[in-house]
Image (tube, rainbow, N blue to C red):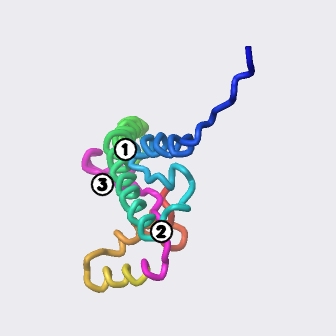
Amino acid sequence: MSQMEAQQPATGYAEFKHEILNEIARCLNMPFNVAAANSASYNYASGRLDHQTYHRAICVDQAHLASIVLDRILAAWLDEAVLLPGFLPAGLGRIADWPHQWFWDGFDHVDPSKESNAQATRLANFTTTLADEYARRGLDWEPSCDSGPTKSR
């Protein structure tokens, strides 16, 4: 009888953890450096490229969530709201025809100066609108009762 020799973690354990975390992150369209909270092995361009894909995947998820969940909740709420006399203004027409829009938090650019110049170019050549640029930042371009554009609630 003798004492067992501890051989864990093995020398390949770090690589094993990396691969497992990478597999988990990929099914979420999440870059490895976000999942690992470590960008030590990334250069700037690689990090930006991975984040662009990740942000687009988040936008797809948000659009899906809006149409499958939020629009249904809004419709159910409006169905109940019309039952309360005087709760909604009169003469608004059919509920199904009411326009609405969902606003999500925007993504900050790592280089605000470059993003500002790109935004000015897009506005100057009419490939975007002020409403789109505000929405990109998660803001509503229409002024509220307060002063100026605000975060949607």
Answer whether residue 132 is magenta in the image. no
Q: Whole-percent x and y of residue 98?
A: 29, 51
Whichever of callouts 3 and 2 sits on the residue coming sooner in the sequence is: 2
Which residue bears the numbered disc 3? Answer: 99
Q: Whole-percent x and y of residue 85?
A: 42, 39
Q: Is residue 151 above or below residue 5?
A: below
Residue 65: image tag: 1
Q: Whole-percent x and y of residue 101?
A: 35, 55
C-alpha span from label 3 to label 2: 44 Å
Magenta highlight: main SS: loop
Q: Whole-percent x and y of residue 52?
A: 38, 62
Front disc: 3 or 1? 1
Horizontal side of residue 63 vs 9, given as left or right: left
Residue 6 vs residue 25, the one in the foreground: 6
Give SS at disc 3: loop
Residue numbers of the magenta segment: 89-115
Answer whether residue 114 is magenta in the image. yes
C-alpha span from label 3 to label 1: 17 Å
Question: What residue is drawn where x is 51% and y is 61%?
Answer: 41
Horizontal side of residue 92 vs 85, given as left or right: left
Residue 24 vs residue 4, the one in the foreground: 4
Which residue bears the numbered disc 2? Answer: 43
Question: What residue is drawn where x is 30% and y is 54%?
Answer: 99
